[in-house]
Image: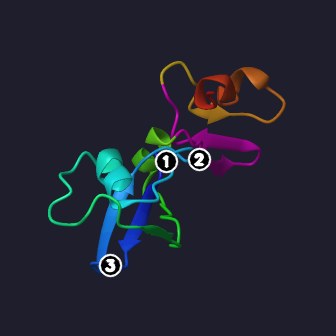
Amino acid sequence: MPLYTYFCPSTNQKLDVTHSIKDKAQTWGELCHLANLEPGETPLSAPVRRLISAPAVMFPTGNSELKSHGFSKLVKRDDGVYENVTATDGESRIVRPGDRNTYPDLKKKIGD
């Protein structure tokens, strides 16, 4: 679920909340309900607005991170031969062009 930052102008407070894209908070009470927090001294009817922020971007740094995120990394070893350094169970470590039995299993890596 995405992380949203809300601002309450009446108290100058910012609050980060994780919730569905379908949910929207327009008051401090609704926001506290989404965040499962006590409202404190701020009135429940105090208006809030969602701030615009840049999305978090993740860059895998190693083969194990690529593998855990469902990516395949092929490294050229010989003329026309590649090594799948992120091969999972049942996948061939050696990939040969034209031999579909050695290709990474995309059905396992791509899910709904």
Query: How far apart in space, not on screen, are marks 1 and 2 (Cα)?
Result: 8 Å
Q: Is residue 50 left or right of residue 45?
A: right
Amino acid type, callout 1: Leu
- Numbered mark located on residue 66 in the image: 1
Give the mark nearest the N terminus, 3 or 1: 3
In the picture of the structure, the residue carrying the numbered disc 2 is: 73
Q: Quadrant of the C terminus?
A: top right
For marks 1 and 2, give the one nearer the viewer. Answer: 1
Identity, as a three-letter code, of the amino acid under mark 2:
Lys
Residue 74: image location, x then y, percent: 63, 46
Judging by the rendered image, the residue that carries numbered circle 3 is 10
**Which residue is found at the position 33% from the left and 60% from the top?**
28
Classify mark 3: helix, strand or loop: loop
Which is nearer the N-term, disc 3 or disc 2?
3
Q: Nearer the viewer, residue 94 or 20?
A: 20
Describe the element under mark 2 as helix, strand or loop.
Answer: loop
State the image coordinates of residue 93 (x, y, percent, origin top left).
Answer: 56, 32
Q: Residue at x 42, y 55 (%)?
A: 62
Disc 2 residue crowd, few under 14, some 14–19, many 20+, Cα 10 Å: some
- 71 on left or right of 35: right
Q: Position of residue 97 (x, y in %)?
A: 80, 36
Q: Specify the segment rendered in magenta.
A: 70-88
The relative height of residue 41 versus residue 33 in the rendered view (above or below) is: below
Res. 12 in view: yes
What amino acid does circle 3 point to?
Ser
Asked whether disc 3 touches disc 1, contact meaning CB atoms under 8 Å apart, the reply is no
* Foreground residue among 4 and 78: 4
Q: Gap in Å between the C-alphas at discs 3 and 1?
A: 45 Å
